[in-house]
């Protein structure tokens, strides 16, 4: 990322991180119910899905100048610390138990063996994911950047947009729309280069072409994209064995782009010392937050806490504890392996 921080982008990254925590905490997915459905939880779940696409767009935007000129050497310098963190956190998540009840009743190794066997049933997918599901972001980011870098390296920059678009369409057709197309992929299409390349390409091209959109049209783009995303999700949920919850749909790029252009149009949004202080912790919070979510939900079950109460406190508790862990790790010799 550029050394010159833009306040609105830093603010956007923090909001996106909070959205991811809310998504993974499954807040309000048990109560309240409306006609037997957790409509509030379902709505919050969907609203949160802009976050990782926005991260990818920002990565493409900030890496474009140096990736264009330095290509493979810069990609390696960018990727190396991320790979170290991905491996380190994967090892941690392979060791730490997730289910307190199974550990108490059957023992640590019984709990871990079940999880290890689950990962080994899909080894290729696990390779593109890591020791815990949310770590897919790093292989996704790096595989997308690798595709773009190779095209630049072999002087095929004109193919960046078509290749990224083809990967995106295949990812959807073999992913969320697979029940309609009968296409399949060797890995879960959210992982790897399928969606990440396209989202990174958007940021890359915005920076390269110096594209900007007014605040008014940015908001319109965001609303149209989100509306399309929800419409697709609802349509797919009505199909046989369909689901309402999807990571990426056709509306995702428009929705995430709208948010990105809003941040680009309002560079001073969120310009506060708290924003600049928290922004440097975002990647670390992302990498460690899910184990805090898992342990929080374990404690909620053990104590029998009301699900509405637990949903209210989930995001602030996880965010604060994760931030404390990241800042604590930064003061130890382990910092270079676990946080940036």
Image (cartoon, rainbow, N blue to C red):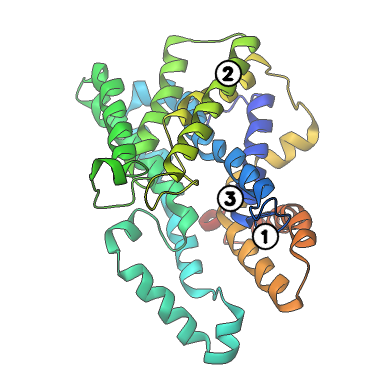
Name the residue tied to disc 2: 261
- Secondary structure found at label 2: helix
Give the residue drawn at x 64%, y 14%.
Answer: 265
Which numbered disc, 2 or 3, marks the residue closer to the eye? Answer: 2
Q: Residues within 10 Å of mark 3 (few under 14, many from 20)?
A: many
35 or 263: nearer the eye?
Answer: 35
Residue 13 placed where, x, y %? 62, 36
- Secondary structure found at label 3: helix
Q: Is residue 219 left or right of residue 97?
A: right
Residue 162 placed where, x, y %? 26, 22
Which numbered disc, 2 or 1, marks the residue closer to the eye? Answer: 1
- Secondary structure found at label 1: loop
When the figure is inspected, residue 61 is found, relative to residue 15, above or below; the finding is above
240 or 301: nearer the eye?
Answer: 240
Can residue 59 be seen by looking at this rendering? no
Q: Residues within 10 Å of mark 1 (few under 14, many from 20)?
A: some
Residue 231 placed where, x, y %? 50, 32
The total of numbered circles placed on residues is: 3
Give the residue drawn at x 61%, y 66%.
Answer: 294
Can residue 120 be seen by looking at this rendering? yes
Disc 2 and disc 3 in contact, CB within 8 angstroms: no
Name the residue tied to disc 1: 30
When the figure is inspected, residue 192 is found, relative to residue 205, above or below; the finding is below
When the figure is inspected, residue 201 is found, relative to residue 332, above or below; the finding is above
Q: Which mark is residue 286?
A: 3
Real-space Cα separation, disc 2 to disc 1, in angstroms: 35 Å
In primary-sequence order, the first of circles 3 and 1 is 1
Which numbered disc, 3 or 1, marks the residue closer to the eye? Answer: 1
Give the residue drawn at x 73%, y 55%.
Answer: 32
Real-space Cα separation, disc 2 to disc 3, in angstroms: 23 Å
Real-space Cα separation, disc 3 to disc 1, in angstroms: 24 Å
Residue 244 placed where, x, y %? 49, 46
């Amino acid at each position: 990322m550029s050394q010159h921080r833009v306040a609105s982008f830093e603010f956007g990254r923090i909001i996106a991180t909070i959205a991811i925590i809310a998504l993974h905490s499954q807040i309000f997915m048990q109560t309240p119910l409306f006609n037997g459905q957790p409509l509030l939880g379902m709505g919050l779940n969907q609203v949160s899905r802009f976050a990782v696409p926005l991260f990818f767009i920002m990565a493409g935007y900030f890496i474009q100048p140096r990736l264009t000129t330095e290509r493979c050497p810069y990609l390696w310098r960018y990727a190396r610390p991320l790979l170290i963190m991905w491996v380190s956190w994967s090892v941690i998540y392979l060791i730490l138990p997730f289910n307190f009840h199974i550990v108490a009743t059957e023992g640590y190794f019984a709990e871990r063996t079940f999880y290890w066997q689950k990962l080994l049933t899909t080894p290729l997918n696990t390779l593109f994911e890591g020791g815990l599901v949310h770590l897919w972001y790093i292989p996704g980011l790096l595989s997308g950047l690798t595709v773009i870098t190779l095209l630049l390296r072999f002087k095929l920059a004109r193919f960046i947009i078509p290749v990224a678009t083809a990967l995106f369409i295949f990812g959807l057709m073999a992913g969320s729309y697979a029940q309609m197309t009968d296409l399949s992929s060797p890995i879960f299409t959210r992982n790897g280069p399928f969606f990440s390349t396209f989202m990174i390409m958007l940021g890359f091209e915005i920076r390269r072409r110096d594209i900007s959109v007014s605040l008014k049209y940015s908001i319109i783009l965001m609303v149209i994209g989100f509306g399309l995303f929800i419409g697709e999700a609802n349509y797919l949920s009505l199909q046989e064995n369909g689901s309402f919850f999807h990571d990426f749909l056709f509306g995702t790029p428009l929705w995430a782009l709208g948010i990105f252009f809003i941040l680009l149009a309002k560079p001073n949004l969120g310009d506060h010392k708290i924003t600049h202080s928290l922004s440097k912790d975002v990647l670390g919070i992302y990498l460690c937050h899910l184990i805090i979510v898992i342990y929080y939900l374990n404690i909620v079950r053990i104590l029998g806490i009301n699900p509405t109460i637990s949903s209210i406190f989930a995001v602030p508790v996880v965010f604060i504890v994760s931030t404390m862990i990241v800042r604590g790790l930064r003061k130890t010799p382990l910092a270079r392996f676990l946080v940036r």
